[in-house]
């Protein structure tokens, strides 16, 4: 089982990050700010139990998620929309499917994030938006 425990600092992204955020109904000013702020993930993992603290520059959008892989939890997207998140192991990766709680359809109102370790010092979050825009956020171990 992959262990994501550690403190991770976002260093870059690959792909259309702006397109993913736009698909999630994030306004232009928030999209620009999101690309400029520093983001850290502080993760403690105990088997399937995950504790993920997301810390941002200025602390304006810090959040703490606790969940068990294979279960679900509620999360708030940068747009302010609440999503029901289901999680599962996909080999050594954790796949999160975020579905808009107000949604009656699956395709247009959900997106996925896949968390993986590229190597022992690099964590990647793969985003796939409702309209199939894709990007990867790259984090380095601190």
Image (spheres, helix red, strand yellow):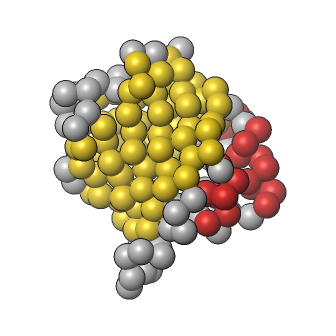
Compared with residue 137, is residue 109 higher up or lower down, i.e. above or below?
below
Q: Is residue 54 left or right of residue 51?
A: right
Number of marks drawn: 0
Residue lying farthest bottom? 104
Residue 109 vertical placement versus 38 (above, below): below
The residue at the point 60 percent across, 29 percent down is 10
Question: What residue is rendered at 28% in x and 52% in y?
Answer: 87
The quarter of the picture where the N terminus appears is top left
Instruction: Look at 46% across and 16% down and name the residue there.
Output: 121
**Residue 127: x percent and y percent?**
50, 50
Quadrant in the rendering for residue 111:
bottom left
The image position of residue 116, as x and y in percent, is: 38, 33
Q: Is residue 42 visible?
A: no
* 24 lies above or below 67: below
Find residue 92 and report its horizontal and vertical position in percent: 25, 33
Question: Could you tell me if residue 138 is visible in this image?
Answer: yes
Of residues 96 and 126, the one nearer the viewer is 126
Please state if 27 lies on the left or on the right of 97 as rendered: right
Q: Position of residue 81 (x, y in %)?
A: 54, 67
Residue located at (38% from left, 85% from top): 104
């Amino acid at each position: 089982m992959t262990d994501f425990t550690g403190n991770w600092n976002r260093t870059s992204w690959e792909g259309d990050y702006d397109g993913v955020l736009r698909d999630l109904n994030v306004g232009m000013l928030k999209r620009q700010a999101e690309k400029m702020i520093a983001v850290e993930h502080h993760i403690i993992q105990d088997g399937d139990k995950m504790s993920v603290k997301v810390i941002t520059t200025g602390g304006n959008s810090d959040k703490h998620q606790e969940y068990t892989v294979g279960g679900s939890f509620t999360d708030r997207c940068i747009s302010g929309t609440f999503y029901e998140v289901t999680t599962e192991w996909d080999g050594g990766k954790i796949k999160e499917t975020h579905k808009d709680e107000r949604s009656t359809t699956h395709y247009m109102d959900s997106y996925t994030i896949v968390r993986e370790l590229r190597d022992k010092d690099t964590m990647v979050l793969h985003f796939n938006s409702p309209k199939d825009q894709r990007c990867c956020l790259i984090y380095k171990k601190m």
